[in-house]
């Protein structure tokens, strides 16, 4: 009797333990269900597994209640324990599987981000990384490859409507011609080089502008190499830089001697080169202005007005164009038995012209006229004369050189020697293009362009010589203050 009671008590305790296990399994089922929702991103299969485990938990709970009234509870308890271990292992396996999928998804995402090629197109989308080609432009515009090529080469055999359509396609696709690929394929680059002095100065900038405009009209592009100093080594380095870019021809607008121009011609070998600022007597190909005609015109004009005391303000001593202009002035004066009242050198800038005139006035140089090597220097000359209260042109006449666009608006408007920079740019480029592909060029020639004296309001007959240094009102006021402070010095 006692044994039966003990057995019943043991079975009752076992039933309660199984019931507790069932509740624990039920909680595990809910946990697994929550895990299933978390694993939803990994697939509906994981979610289904969570429901399956929840159902298993309810089944175990029911089994626990059944064991309360069952005589074979021990066997079922063992089965329940084994099944619980199996569920626990399944849960860990699912957790590990989900973590693996999570890592894989990140790896795939990184791979996509790294390997997905992109390129910007007109609609603002991202497409393939391949560069836009001339075929893409042709398809976009609905024309042939050859028609696009004609537009790129500025051929006149394309209607304006078609040209506009292709240009819009080029802009929309951001197409850039691959010059390097064209050269490697044996095609011409249609690129020319220009070596020039400081483009902040009027003459070099105007010449460069004319060259680029004419080149574009002729189907060429221009690469510019600007040098700061006027020595031949700097020019040679600039030429090497252009040759490394495989330009088809080179224009050089920097002052060079005959020897220096010959050395650069040899440096360029088979690449045609045209010089724009050399002695007209040079043996190299050149297109230059006649330096003697311009200086002769300006000196003759002053002599005809009656001037005999003429000061000269030249450009840099090392500049060949400055030397030629100075030589022209001196030769024309000498032919009339005259010498300059003074000869000073500037650097083409307005500031240098201003300082040169101040030095002439400080040294009490007698002059009734000034010949200036550039209009920009002449601007500084006029400023200095105005500051010293010297009337222009009644007391001092001034003649510039270049005829810049602003010289007509100086105060007073400047008389100057006109050089047609647009014509120089066009002529030099046309001559360079004519040399391209010419295997048997003629003997180098120099094309000399004429100059013209433009009369405005800075010249007139002389009224007398400047016998003494003029002072500005400020200088006069300072002098009076000194007298007042030291009355005994009078």
Image: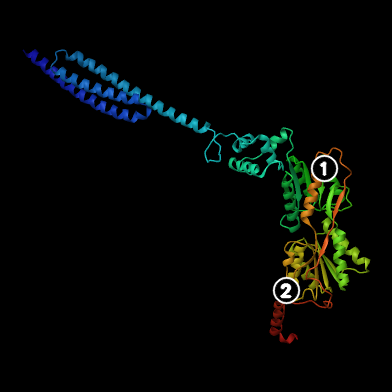
Residue identifier under label 2: 387
Specify whether 231 is left or right of 109.
right
Is 28 above or below relative to 138? Answer: above
In the structure shown, which secondary structural element does the residue marked by tag 1 occupy?
helix
Q: Is residue 200 visible?
A: yes
Is 107 above or below relative to 2? Answer: below
The residue mark sitting in front, 1 or 2, is 1
In the structure shown, which secondary structural element does the residue marked by tag 2 occupy?
helix
- Please tell me in which quadrant of the rendered image residue 7 appears: top left
Q: Considering the image in quadrants, where does the C terminus appear?
A: bottom right
Q: Position of residue 454 (x, y in %)?
A: 80, 65
Q: Position of residue 486 (x, y in %)?
A: 71, 84
Q: Is residue 354 visible?
A: no
Q: Considering the image in quadrants, where does the N terminus appear?
A: top left
For the residue pair 140 and 191, the one nearer the viewer reads as 140
Q: Position of residue 488 (x, y in %)?
A: 73, 87
Residue identifier under label 1: 435
């Amino acid at each position: 009797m006692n044994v039966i009671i003990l057995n019943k008590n043991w079975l009752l305790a076992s039933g309660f333990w199984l019931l507790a296990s069932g509740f624990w399994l039920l909680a595990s089922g809910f946990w697994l269900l929550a895990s299933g929702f978390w694993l939803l991103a990994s697939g509906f299969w994981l979610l289904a597994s969570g429901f399956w485990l929840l159902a298993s938990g309810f089944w175990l709970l029911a089994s626990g209640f059944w064991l309360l009234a069952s005589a074979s509870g021990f066997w079922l308890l063992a089965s329940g324990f084994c099944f619980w271990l199996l569920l626990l292992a399944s849960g860990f396996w699912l957790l590990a599987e989900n973590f693996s999928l999570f890592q894989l998804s990140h790896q795939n995402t990184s791979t996509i981000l790294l390997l997905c090629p992109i390129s910007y197109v007109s609609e603002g989308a991202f497409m393939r990384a391949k560069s836009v080609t001339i075929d893409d432009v042709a398809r976009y515009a609905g024309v042939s490859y050859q028609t696009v090529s004609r537009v790129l080469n500025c051929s006149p055999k394309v209607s304006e409507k078609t040209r506009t359509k292709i240009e819009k396609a080029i802009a929309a696709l951001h197409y850039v011609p691959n010059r390097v690929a064209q050269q490697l394929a044996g095609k011409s680059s249609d690129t020319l080089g220009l070596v020039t002095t400081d483009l902040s100065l009027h003459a070099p900038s105007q010449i460069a502008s004319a060259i680029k405009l004419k080149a574009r009209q002729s189907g060429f592009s221009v690469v510019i190499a600007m040098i700061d100093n006027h020595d031949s080594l700097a020019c040679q380095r600039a030429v090497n830089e252009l040759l490394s870019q495989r330009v088809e021809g080179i224009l050089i607008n920097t002052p060079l001697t005959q020897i220096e121009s010959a050395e650069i011609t040899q440096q360029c070998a088979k690449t045609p080169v045209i010089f724009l600022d050399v002695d007209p007597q040079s043996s190299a190909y050149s297109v230059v202005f006649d330096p003697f005609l311009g200086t002769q015109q300006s000196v003759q004009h002053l002599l005809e007005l009656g001037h005999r005391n003429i000061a000269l303000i030249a450009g840099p001593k090392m500049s060949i164009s400055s030397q030629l202009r100075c030589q022209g002035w001196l030769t024309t004066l000498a032919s009339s038995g005259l010498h300059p009242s003074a000869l000073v050198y500037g650097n083409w800038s307005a500031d240098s012209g201003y300082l040169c005139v101040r030095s002439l006035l400080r040294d009490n140089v007698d002059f009734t006229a000034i010949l200036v090597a550039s209009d920009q220097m002449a601007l500084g000359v006029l400023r200095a004369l105005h500051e010293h209260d010297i009337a222009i042109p009644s007391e001092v006449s001034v003649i510039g050189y270049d005829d810049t666009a602003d010289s007509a608006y100086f105060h007073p408007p400047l008389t100057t020697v006109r050089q047609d920079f647009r014509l120089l740019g066009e002529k030099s480029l046309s001559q360079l293009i004519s040399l391209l592909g010419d295997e048997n060029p003629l003997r180098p020639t120099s094309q000399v362009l004429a100059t013209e004296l433009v009369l405005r309001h800075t010249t007139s007959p002389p009224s007398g010589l400047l016998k003494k240094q003029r002072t500005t009102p400020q200088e006069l006021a300072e002098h009076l203050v000194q007298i007042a402070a030291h009355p005994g010095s009078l």
